[in-house]
Image (cartoon, helix red, strand yellow):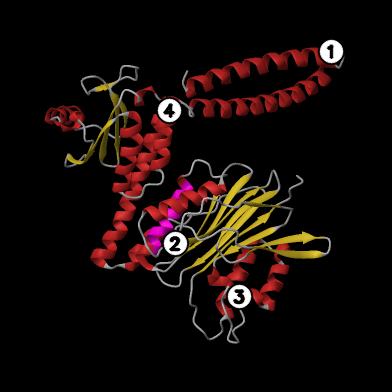
Amino acid sequence: MDYRTGRSAASTISWGVSAAFFTALTYFASEGFGALGAMGIAVVSFALVFIARRAAFARYDEYHYKRVFSRGATKLVSDFVERVRTCFTMPEFVAAIRDGLERTLDATVVLIKSNTWDVVYASPTNLAADPGLMVVLKRNFRELSEGLAFLDEKYSLTMPSENDRGLFIFAKGYYLFIFSRAIVQADHDVHRIMHAEIQILFDRVLTVSRLFQIAALSKEWRLIAETQRTFLPASLPEQPKLALAAYFRPLVNVSGDYYDAIRVDDDRTLLVMGDVSGKGLGAALVMGIAVNTIRAAVDKVDLAGLIRKCDNAIREMGFEDKYTVLFLGLADVKKKTLRYVNAALPEQFLVVRTVRGPVVRRLESNHGIVGLVDQADVAVEEIELRTDDVLILSTDGLTELENEQGLPLDEAPEFNRLLGEANELDITDLVDRLATLGETYVGGKALRDDITILAAKVGRLWD
């Protein structure tokens, strides 16, 4: 039974059991209470049964998903999809095909540019080398629209079955043919996920290619900056118990700073703050790699895993002098915790309200630079969150600003006074005041770095 069929069957059964239990509970519990009392009991019973059913189904769905996606061909395809999420260039995608499809699933893969029918990649197999194959494929698939389909023995479209010859994916102007009987045995949901991730991959490839073309041909750094800004969030997610605000001011058009806030679920939010070494095209590429790697990850709760994914993705690009410092913080308002990794960023700040007044906790670096050297062990720290706590993230472009007397901003009385007021301020007002302080603190001197701020304020956790 595939994932969707099993999920649908479980949902139907759970609703049936819930309805029977609700009927029995209401019938036996409401005897002797009259019409009004029975109605009240029915409402309470429905709420209890609904909550219990939702919790039980969620647990089953998680178990069923892991069971289906962790075995056989489904797991092998899932591993390939995970590899695709870290690809940013066509050579990286070809390497993923060789490792994740040809070697593990004994697949023959042909990748074709749809408008010209030029072969981008073909597996070194007899099937791919057969000149008759291209003739048949061109005849059968020349005019198709984007989508996912299955191939029969004659390389034509067919309905999914155990006898299918392989898969066909048309995405973003590319035809991808995967000839493998093993791959069609995988759960159909993983096929759909693969199709979606390959679409996203080709978008990334086009973006990176555009950056290189702009830099090499036109030198229009303004256009590079506009492309780079697409890596930053267009808006911050809305969370009932976590207010967010951000400020971003690049020193030049192309910045090395980046930030993000990703809603994981109703209770958890992933906060990201980073700074890439240097400026220019290389910094823009590394920034895009880091942001997209984090966004594309399926498990955004595994902070150590996210750090390792970013590290591997950056090092695979082959830059000798490009790396990033990075803070990842997972705010969980249900568990009232903040789990974080500070990979070589300056100290970040958590302002805690206590009975003796505000206390500023400095979240120091607990990991090395990302993208420079392989570091297998990643330390993840956890601290408690309370109502009105304020987390302030920034790069060194803010905290290392110096006034005309040479005093760093994070040691200045006005900065620490503003942190002391953070619990009482609206989060947007706090960020505005921090940004204004940063821009005016240098006095007559010129700014020398980007200023980036991301702040979060915890709401009433006892509600």
**Mark before the other along the chain sequence, 4 or 3:** 4
User: Considering the numbered disc 3 on the image, is that residue within a helix, a strand or a loop?
Assistant: helix
**Disc 2 packing (10 Å; few <14; some 14–19; many ≥20):** many
> In this rendering, does residue 395 appear at all?
yes
Q: Name the residue under label 1.
A: 31
Rendered position, 366 above or below 7: below
Q: Rounded to the nearest whole Å, what is the CA distance between mark 4 and mark 2?
A: 34 Å
Q: Position of residue 122 (x, y in %)?
A: 22, 37
Residue 173 lies in what quarter of the image? top left
Q: Nearer the viewer, mark 4 or mark 3?
A: 4
Q: Which residues are the magenta region? A: 283-295
**In this rendering, is residue 76 above or below 311?**
above
Which amino acid, by three-letter code, is at mark 4? Thr
The residue beneath circle 3 is: 437
Which residue is depicted at the point 80% across and 12% down? 28
Residue 74 placement (x, y as % from top left): 43, 28
Secondary structure that dominates the magenta span = helix
The disc labelled 3 sits on which kind of residue?
Leu
Q: Residue 74 carries which label?
A: 4
Q: For the residues marked 1 and 2, what is the alpha-carbon distance in whole angstroms?
A: 70 Å
Name which of mark 4 and mark 2 comes first in the sequence: 4
Residue in view at x 44 percent, y 61 percent: 323
Identify residue type, mark 2: Tyr
Would residue 30 be found to the left or right of residue 350 on screen?
right
Tell me which label, 3 or 2, sits earlier in the chain.
2
Q: Earlier in the sequence, mark 1 or mark 2?
A: 1
User: x and y percent of residue 9 in the render?
Assistant: 54, 17
Q: How far apart are marks 4 and 3 (CA)?
A: 54 Å
Circle 1: residue type: Glu
Identify the residue position indicated by label 2 in the image.
323
Q: Do the residues labelled 4 and 3 touch (CB within 8 Å)?
A: no
